[in-house]
Image (cartoon, rainbow, N blue to C red):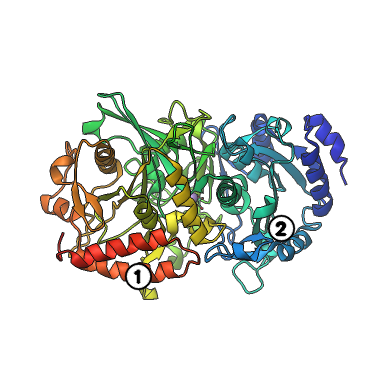
C-alpha cells in the first residue's frame, strides 16, 4: 500500500475530504502507486504512454490509441442510476437501490488495480467562476493513463479546483477501475461490467471498461447524468445539447442557439458549422460546445447556457472537408489530439476512418485496422470490413477549434435565444418549425426521436424516441423532468424560442436528400432568430410556424424549387399517425405534467381540423 499522504502532500492536495476519499479507494482497489495529475503533466504522461506502447504517434504531436475490441462504446444496458429513494425510478434511468449497487461495485473493484497506478484527477466541469461551479468540481480516480490524458483534454484538471472549494466536501467522487477486459463477459449473460451513478450521494462507480463515456467520468457520468440530477434538486438544467453563437455583422447582434439531437443526427457538425460562403461576409458562427450544455436562469431573467466541457470527444466517421472542416482543423498536427479506434499507419503515422476520403488509401503498406490487424493481410471475406470502428473518436481541446467563441471561458455563460431539437427523419418533419408556447416546446423535446434505420426490426419509419436527446443520460423520472423544464423555462422572464429542425428529409421516390445540409443549415437558424426578433412572420401550421420561402436567406443555395416546397410543408396525414405514436410514448411516463398533455391534445386537435396538405 503506497503512502498516500506523502503523495498528496507532495502534490499540494490539501482538501481533507478529497484526501480521505483517495485513501479509502487506494485501499479498496489495491493500487500499487498513487499519482495526482494536473494539466501540466500532459507532456510527461504522453511520453510515458508512448514509451509503454499505450499510445502511438500520429503526425507531429498527436496520438493514436486502440481500446479492447469488446470495449468500444458506452454500454446503456450496464449503466445504472442508483439512489436510496425508489420514487427516483424512471423509464430510462435503470434505477436500482444504492444499498444494492454500492457493495456490488466495491466488491468488483476490490484489489482490481493491483500492480497499477491509481491516478487522482481533480477536475472542474465548468469555466472557473461559473455560477454553477459548486456542482462542477470532481475527483476521478482511474487506473488508466489513457483515461487521464483524455480527461486532461475534456475537463479542466488541477488540484486548485478541489483545494479552493468553498464547501470542501462538495465534489463528485468518481471511481474508475478498468478491470480485466478480456475476462468480463461483455455482452453475455455473465457481464461483469457496471457503470453506476449514485446520484443522491454524488458518487460515480464505473467498473469494466477503459473507453469513452464508460471511463471519462467527468464528461457523461458527471457532466450529464449526475449534473441532470443535481440540476433537478438545485434549479438548473443539464442537457446533451450543442451550443453555438451567430453574430450578424450588419447589426452587431449576437444570437445563441443550443439544442439536442439524438446520436448520428449531426450534432457535432452543426455545432462546428460555418456560414455558407454567400452569407459569410455578414454572419459569423462561433462554437461553444458540441455535446453538453448546463442552463440556468440569470439575474436578468434570461436563460443562460455554458458548455461544462473543455474539449471535444467527436465521432470520427464521416468527418471530412465537406461535413466538418472545423473539426479537421481542430485535430491538426500539434493539437495533441488522441485518435481512438481509427485505422493507423505504423510507417507514416497517419490515421484514416470511413468517410475521411471517398475511398481508403490505395497503398495498403503500413495500414492497420481498429482491431490491430494489417489491412494488406485481410482475407477475401474481410475485404469489406470497416478500417475504423464506427464509434471511433478524436479527442481534442476546445482551444484547438478554430472558431471557438472568444468568450467560451466566460463564467457568466451566454444568454440563450433559441432551443432547437432535431433528429434524423426522412419524411414529415419540415426544415424548421418554430414553437413559441413553452409547454409545446417542452412537449416537442419530449417527443424527439431519430428514425430507426433497421427495417428488419419492423421499426421502419418509426422513431426511437429520445426525449431531449437525454434518453441514455436521464437520471430521474421523465414526468418530473418535464415539470422541471416547465419550471426553469417558466421562471425566465425573457423566454427562448423553441424549434424543431430536420436536415434529413428525403424524396419518397428516389431517396435523395431534399436539403443540402451542412453549412446551409445555418439558413434555418437565421430564419428562426429573425422570427424571434419579429422580422419575419412565417406561416402558422398545426405543428408550429414554418418559413415562407421568401423569408429564408437563399443566396447561393442550390436547391430544386419543388424540394424546397416539400421542406416547408406539413404532411397532415403522416403527422396524425405520429401523434398516435407519441401518445403511447408519453403514457409510459409517471407524473407527466398536465400542461404537456394539453400541448399534445392541442396539436392533435389542430391536425384533426387541418386539410391534408398544409
Ligand atoms: C456520447 C458522447 O456517447 O458524446 O453521446 O460521447
Ligand atoms: Mn454525446
According to the image, label 2 marks what residue? 179
CB at disc 2 and ligand 1 closer than 8 Å: no
Question: 375 or 76: nearer the eye?
Answer: 76
Element assignment for label 1: helix
Residue 169 lies, with reference to residue 515, above or below; the image says: above
Q: Position of residue 393 (x, y in %)?
A: 50, 48
Left or right position of 499 against 293: left
According to the image, label 1 marks what residue? 581
Element assignment for label 2: loop
Left or right position of 600 against 216: left
The Cα atoms of the two marked residues, 2 and 1, are separated by: 42 Å
Residue 415 location, quadrant: top left
Question: 443 or 390: nearer the eye?
Answer: 443
Q: Position of residue 584 (x, y in %)?
A: 39, 71
Residue 597 location, quadrant: bottom left
Left or right position of 262 against 590: left
Kindly identify the residue that appears in the image at 46 percent across and 70 percent down: 588
CB at disc 1 and ligand 1 closer than 8 Å: no
Q: Is residue 54 visible?
A: no
Given contact means CB atoms under 8 Å apart, are the residues at marks 2 and 1 in contact? Answer: no
Amino acid at each position: 500500500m503506497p503512502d498516500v499522504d506523502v503523495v498528496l502532500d507532495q502534490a499540494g492536495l490539501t482538501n481533507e475530504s478529497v484526501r480521505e476519499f483517495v485513501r479509502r479507494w487506494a485501499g479498496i482497489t489495491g493500487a500499487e502507486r498513487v499519482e495526482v495529475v494536473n494539466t501540466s503533466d500532459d507532456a510527461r504522461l504522453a511520453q510515458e504512454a508512448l514509451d509503454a506502447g499505450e499510445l502511438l504517434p500520429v503526425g507531429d504531436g498527436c496520438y493514436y490509441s486502440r481500446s479492447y475490441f469488446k470495449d468500444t462504446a458506452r454500454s446503456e444496458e450496464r449503466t445504472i442510476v442508483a439512489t436510496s429513494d425508489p420514487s427516483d425510478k424512471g423509464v430510462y434511468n435503470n434505477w436500482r437501490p444504492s444499498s444494492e449497487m454500492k457493495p456490488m461495485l466495491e466488491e468488483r473493484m476490490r484489489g482490481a488495480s493491483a500492480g497499477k497506478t491509481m491516478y487522482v484527477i481533480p477536475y472542474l466541469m465548468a469555466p472557473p467562476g461559473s455560477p454553477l461551479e459548486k456542482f462542477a468540481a470532481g475527483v476521478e480516480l482511474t487506473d488508466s493513463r489513457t483515461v487521464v490524458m483524455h480527461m486532461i483534454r475534456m475537463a479542466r484538471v488541477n488540484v486548485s479546483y478541489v483545494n479552493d472549494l468553498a464547501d470542501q466536501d462538495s465534489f463528485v467522487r468518481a471511481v474508475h477501475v478498468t478491470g480485466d477486459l478480456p475476462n468480463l463477459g461483455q455482452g453475455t449473460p455473465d457481464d461483469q461490467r457496471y457503470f453506476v451513478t449514485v446520484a443522491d450521494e454524488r458518487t460515480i462507480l464505473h467498473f469494466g471498461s477503459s473507453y469513452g463515456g464508460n471511463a471519462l467520468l467527468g464528461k457523461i457520468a458527471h457532466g450529464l447524468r449526475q449534473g441532470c440530477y443535481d440540476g433537478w434538486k438545485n434549479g438548473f438544467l443539464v442537457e446533451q445539447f450543442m451550443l453555438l453563437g451567430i453574430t450578424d455583422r450588419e447589426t452587431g447582434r449576437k444570437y445563441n442557439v443550443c439544442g439536442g439531437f439524438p446520436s448520428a443526427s449531426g450534432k457535432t457538425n452543426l455545432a462546428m458549422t460555418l456560414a455558407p460562403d454567400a452569407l459569410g461576409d455578414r454572419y459569423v458562427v462561433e462554437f461553444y460546445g458540441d455535446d453538453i450544455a448546463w442552463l440556468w436562469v440569470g439575474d436578468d431573467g434570461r436563460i443562460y447556457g455554458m458548455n461544462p466541457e473543455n474539449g471535444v470527444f467527436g465521432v470520427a466517421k464521416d468527418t471530412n472537408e465537406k461535413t466538418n472542416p472545423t473539426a479537421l482543423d481542430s485535430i491538426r498536427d500539434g493539437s495533441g489530439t488522441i485518435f481512438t479506434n481509427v485505422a493507423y499507419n505504423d510507417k507514416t503515422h497517419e490515421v484514416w476512418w470511413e468517410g475521411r476520403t471517398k475511398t481508403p488509401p490505395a497503398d495498403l503498406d503500413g495500414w492497420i485496422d481498429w482491431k490491430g490487424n494489417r489491412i494488406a493481410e485481410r482475407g477475401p471475406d474481410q475485404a469489406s470490413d470497416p478500417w475504423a470502428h464506427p464509434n471511433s473518436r478524436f479527442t481534442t481541446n476546445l482551444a484547438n477549434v478554430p472558431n471557438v467563441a472568444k468568450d467560451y471561458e466566460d463564467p457568466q455563460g451566454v444568454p440563450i435565444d433559441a432551443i432547437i431539437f432535431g433528429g434524423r427523419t426522412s419524411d414529415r418533419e419540415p426544415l424548421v418549425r418554430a414553437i413559441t408556447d413553452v409547454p409545446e416546446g417542452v412537449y416537442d423535446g419530449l417527443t424527439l426521436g431519430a428514425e430507426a434505420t433497421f427495417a428488419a426490426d419492423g421499426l421502419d419509419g418509426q422513431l426511437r424516441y429520445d426525449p431531449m436527446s437525454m434518453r441514455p443520460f436521464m437520471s430521474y423520472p421523465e414526468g418530473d423532468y418535464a415539470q422541471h423544464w416547465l419550471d426553469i423555462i417558466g421562471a425566465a422572464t425573457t423566454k427562448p424560442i423553441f424549434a424543431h429542425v430536420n436536415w434529413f428529409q428525403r424524396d419518397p421516390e428516389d431517396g435523395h436528400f431534399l436539403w443540402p445540409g451542412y453549412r446551409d443549415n445555418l439558413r434555418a437558424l437565421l430564419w428562426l432568430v429573425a422570427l424571434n426578433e419579429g422580422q419575419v412572420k412565417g406561416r402558422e401550421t398545426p405543428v408550429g410556424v414554418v418559413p415562407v420561402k421568401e423569408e429564408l436567406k437563399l443566396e447561393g443555395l442550390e436547391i430544386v424549387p419543388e424540394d424546397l416546397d416539400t421542406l416547408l410543408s406539413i404532411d397532415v396525414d403522416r403527422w396524425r399517425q405520429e401523434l398516435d405514436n407519441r401518445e403511447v410514448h408519453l403514457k409510459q411516463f409517471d407524473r407527466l405534467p398536465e400542461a404537456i398533455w394539453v400541448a399534445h391534445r392541442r396539436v392533435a386537435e389542430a391536425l384533426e381540423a387541418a386539410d391534408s396538405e398544409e
